[in-house]
């Protein structure tokens, strides 16, 4: 049985961020996706499970182009860029400091970490550790 925890916080303020784009082309702003659920995947270049789950996020981005998928490297920019040259991602990438993880409920700063925000940009569900396709599909469906 697949378990997806949904924990929307009614009345809580929507989450926001303006992060440097990993390609150096400006900022990735969460408010750009206002009114839409968003999938956030936090990763690092030294994270083996991050490599294994990358094709799952690439497939989701291809299958659901209207659903924003954003990768957030918790890493040095150069290391993250080298990682993406070796393991390309088909969705936008940003870079952030480890302290940014606590904003999205990851107090221990473990990776990989996936968060699905609902259309109000509140945390709907999250997962510490690598995702699989079944979990991601179920979680996205639960968090519209």
Image (cartoon, grey):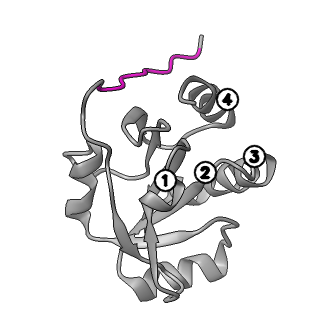
Answer whether labels 1 and 2 touch (C-beta < 8 Å): yes
Between disc 1 and disc 2, whose residue precedes?
1
Name the residue tied to disc 1.
Answer: 41
Q: CA distance from mark 3 to mark 4?
A: 15 Å
Residue 31 in percent (x, y) is at 43, 58
Nearer the camera: disc 1 or disc 3: 3
Residue 69 horizontal side relative to residue 111, left or right: right
Secondary structure category for the residue under label 1: strand
Measure the alpha-carbon separation of dots 1 and 2. 10 Å
In the structure shown, which secondary structural element does the residue marked by tag 3 occupy?
Answer: loop
Counting residues from the start of the chain, the first of labels 4 and 1 encountered is: 1
Query: What residue does disc 3 label?
Result: 64
Q: Nearer the N terminus, badge 1 or badge 3? A: 1
Of 6 and 14, nearer the camera is 14
Q: Earlier in the sequence, mark 2 or mark 3?
A: 2
Residue 53, labelled with which disc? 2
Q: Secondary structure at mark 2?
A: helix
- What is the CA distance from the residue labelled 1 to the residue labelled 3? 16 Å
* Label 1 crowd (10 A; few <14 / some 14-19 / many >=20): many
Quadrant containing the N terminus in the rendered view: top right
Q: Main secondary structure of the magenta part?
A: loop
Range of the magenta residues? 2-9
Badge 4 vs badge 2, beta-carbon distance below 8 Å: no
Residue highlighted by disc 4: 134
Inspect the magenta stretch and tell me whether residue 57 lies in it: no
Residue most extreme to the top:
1
């Amino acid at each position: 049985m697949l378990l997806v925890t949904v924990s929307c916080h009614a009345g809580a303020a929507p989450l926001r961020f303006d992060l440097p784009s990993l390609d150096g082309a400006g900022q990735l702003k969460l408010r750009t996706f206002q009114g839409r659920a968003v999938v956030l995947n936090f990763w690092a270049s030294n994270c083996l499970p991050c490599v294994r789950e990358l094709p799952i996020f690439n497939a989701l981005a291809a299958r659901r182009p209207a659903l924003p998928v954003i990768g957030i490297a918790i890493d040095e920019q150069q290391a993250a860029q080298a990682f993406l040259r070796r393991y390309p991602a088909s969705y936008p990438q940003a870079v952030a400091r480890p302290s940014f993880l606590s904003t999205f409920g990851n107090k221990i700063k473990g990776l990989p970490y996936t968060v699905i925000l609902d259309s109000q940009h509140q945390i709907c569900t999250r997962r510490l550790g690598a995702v699989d396709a079944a979990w991601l599909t179920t979680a996205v469906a639960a968090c519209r």
